[in-house]
């Protein structure tokens, strides 16, 4: 059976597919780059990952992978400012693939004003220049990827920030194991992606996660948006059981919505039960209901497997729409217009 990759390659001029499949190499290379940066510990009351889009998701994923191993707050900041309650001395990672994202640049300055200990992850741009000028350590990222395809790197640097801040014992061994896990599972993930793309094609996915899978649901939504150029939505259980669930009743009157439930063996047993019941209740009005769970011994491995699966599905859907998944001209236009105003 074809894995469908040939069809993706025909339209994928910037090599997004190869970047997604290279996640194990990205993880290992990220660990090496972190090691080479020879970063000093940043003992801190809290850690913040400042970034947008593909450069922010790593913060959410790191917090989820660490779960209850985190002994201090690890927050992702998407915007121009750190929270008003952020403590002086916090460890702040400013993460921007391009190094030119205005919100992240603003946070870099805000962190200075707060008296935070700063760290930067970027390929260059104004952020690298500012970091160099202010002697802030930089973890250099490889160029020529779409920012969202650098998710493995962004995850590793966010996890490293938490470790440097003394918020967790470090994930390096688990990340190394996850890289091997993804390689072992590659064919199974590819086959699954093709099958799920068949089921999701032509529908608007609403993706649910909880605990470990909550940021993965958000990642899926973003990849549907940016790669397939389609609307998609994500939500979190149990909260969605208290409101959004009701909205499914009328969903078939306005469109074809699929319900995707991302489950995990480590989720709270009541959350697992909620996933089952939600699937049953939504089924009559949904265009399809998909319950998914990754295998694997570690939270990091299972989480990244679901990330890779969602990335591949979004590439299949882009291909079926006849579009190149990489360019996101509307984001470029928006950034250009903001720069002019
Ligand atoms: C594009 C993408 C976007 C960017 C975002 C921030 O592939 O994923 O979500 O990540 O516009 O830009 P950077 O990552 O350069 O700071």
Image (cartoon, helix red, strand yellow):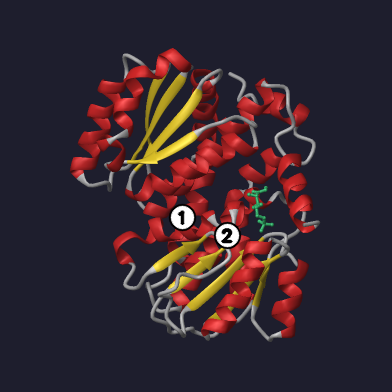
Residue on which disc 2 sits: 154
Sequence order check, earlier mark of 1 and 2: 1
Which quarter of the picture shows residue 81?
A: bottom right
Q: Are marks 1 and 2 in contact (CB under 8 Å)?
A: yes
* Residue 56, x across and y down, in percent: 55, 57
Quadrant occupied by the C terminus: bottom right
* Residue 237, x across and y down, in percent: 30, 41
Compared to residue 266, the image places residue 12 above or below, namely above
Tell me if 195 is positioned left or right of 339 in this view: left
Residue at image position (40%, 57%) is 65
Residue at image position (48%, 28%) is 205
Residue on which disc 1 sits: 61
Residue 38 or 167: which is nearer the viewer?
Answer: 167
- Circle 2 crowding by C-alpha within 10 Å: few under 14, some 14–19, many from 20: many
Compared to residue 242, the image places residue 319 above or below, namely above
Residue 116 or 120: which is nearer the viewer?
Answer: 116
Which quarter of the picture shows residue 103?
A: bottom right
Q: Is residue 29 visible?
A: yes
Tell me if 233 is positioned left or right of 69 in this view: right
Residue 219 or 252: which is nearer the viewer?
Answer: 252
Q: Does any atom of ligand 1 lie closer than 8 Å to the CB of label 2?
A: no
């Amino acid at each position: 059976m074809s894995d469908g990759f040939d069809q993706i390659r025909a339209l994928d001029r910037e090599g997004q597919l190869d970047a997604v499949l290279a996640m194990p190499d990205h993880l290992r290379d990220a660990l090496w780059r972190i090691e080479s940066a020879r970063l000093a510990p940043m003992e801190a009351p809290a850690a913040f990952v400042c970034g947008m889009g593909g450069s922010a998701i790593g913060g959410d994923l790191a917090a989820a992978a660490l779960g209850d191993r985190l002994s201090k707050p690890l927050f992702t900041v998407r915007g121009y400012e750190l929270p008003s309650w952020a403590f002086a001395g916090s460890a702040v990672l400013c993460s921007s693939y391009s190094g030119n994202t205005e919100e992240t640049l603003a946070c870099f300055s805000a962190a200075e004003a707060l008296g935070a200990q700063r760290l930067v992850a970027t390929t260059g741009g104004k952020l690298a220049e500012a970091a160099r000028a202010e002697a802030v350590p930089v973890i250099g990222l490889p160029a020529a990827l779409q920012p969202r395809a650098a998710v493995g790197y962004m995850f590793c640097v966010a996890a490293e920030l938490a470790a440097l801040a003394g918020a967790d014992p470090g994930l390096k061994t688990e990340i190394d194991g996850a890289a091997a896990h993804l390689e072992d599972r590659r064919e199974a993930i590819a086959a699954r992606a093709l099958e799920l793309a068949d089921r999701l094609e032509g529908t608007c996915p609403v993706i649910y996660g909880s605990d470990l899978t909550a940021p993965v649901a958000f990642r899926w939504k973003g990849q549907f948006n940016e790669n397939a150029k389609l609307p998609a939505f994500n939500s979190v259980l149990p909260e969605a059981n208290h409101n959004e669930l009701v909205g499914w009743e009328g969903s078939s009157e306005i469109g074809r919505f699929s319900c995707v439930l991302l489950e995990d063996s480590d989720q709270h047993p009541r959350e697992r039960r909620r996933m089952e019941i939600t699937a049953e209740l939504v089924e009559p009005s949904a265009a399809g209901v998909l319950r998914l769970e990754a295998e694997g011994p570690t939270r990091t491995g299972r989480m990244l497997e679901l990330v890779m699966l969602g990335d591949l599905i979004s590439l299949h859907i882009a291909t079926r729409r006849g579009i190149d998944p990489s360019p996101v001209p509307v984001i470029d236009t928006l950034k250009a217009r903001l720069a002019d105003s």
